[in-house]
Image: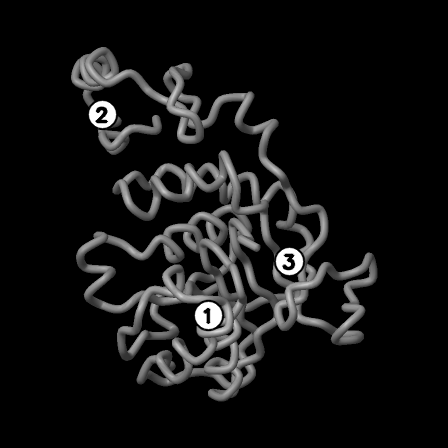
Amino acid sequence: MCMKHSGVTTWPFVRNMLEFAFPPLCLGCDELVPGNTAVCSNCLRRIDYYSQPLCLKCLELLDQQGNCLSCGKGACPLFVLAQYESPVREIIHKLKFSAITTPAEVLARQWCERFGEALLRCQPQVIAPVPLTANREYWRGYNQAELIAEQIAEQLDLTLHGRLLARTSGRRPQSRLKLAERAANVAGVYALADEPREDNLRVVLVDDVVTSGSTIREVARTCEGGGFEVVAGVALAHGR
């Protein structure tokens, strides 16, 4: 179910009444869909999927051998599901701004079908979300990157570390800044959790949308500064 009342799964009578009052709508186009179909077939066809990972450092497409034309061999892959355009944009907006969590499950499943095996070949030990500020997570009710990471961890049998990192200070939202301003805006705002940790832990970082790449690169820099090895990044969409 793709409605705000999607948590109602037990009492069939209540669920049926809710579906009668609030018919299930496609997350992408808001058209009516069958009860358990979160995204209609037309929207799934319209998604502009990536077939190759990007370079986490420069966001250029990697070649078939995993090398970057700009950064050379051994580039850290960023596995992105799709372009940040309709209908993916509308689906992610519902996750971030409408308190509808179904998109995390739907898009994570699509992501795993395309890149799950490739991610496992990176031999990750933990998967960790890019953190929000405590205030923003409180008012949203969740960290959408953590919901996505949970789904991928469950589907690929990976260990989720939801609190590996913390955001220590708030800044202006990246979406409101020019691309050239974004790196400075997030510099120094992330820290590793104050708990015993294993050096050289192989980490996968997860975010919902990557645009300039400044945020996920800053998180990777923080991890590597603490002795971890970032072996891959994951995002549902890349907005150019």
Placement of 198 over or under 5, stated as above or below: below
Work out whether mark 1 precedes mark 3 in sequence or the reverse, and give the earlier one.
3
Q: Earlier in the sequence, mark 2 or mark 3?
A: 2
Helix, strand or loop status at disc 3: helix
| Nearer to us: label 1 or label 3 | 1
- Where residue 220 appears, as percent x and y from the top left, is 51, 76
Residue appearing at x 37%, y 74% in the figure: 165
Circles 1 and 2: CB atoms closer than 8 Å: no
Residue 207 is left or right of residue 48, and the answer is left
Determine whether the residue tagged by mark 1 lies in a helix, strand or loop: helix
Give the number of the disc on residue 120. 3
Give the total number of marks visible in the rendering. Answer: 3
**x then y, percent, for residue 34:** 41, 14
- Give the labeled residue for mark 2: 10
Side (left or right) of 152 relative to 56: left
Residue beneath the point at 37% across and 85% down:
196
Quarter holding the N terminus?
top left
Between 40 and 11, the residue placed more toward the observer is 40
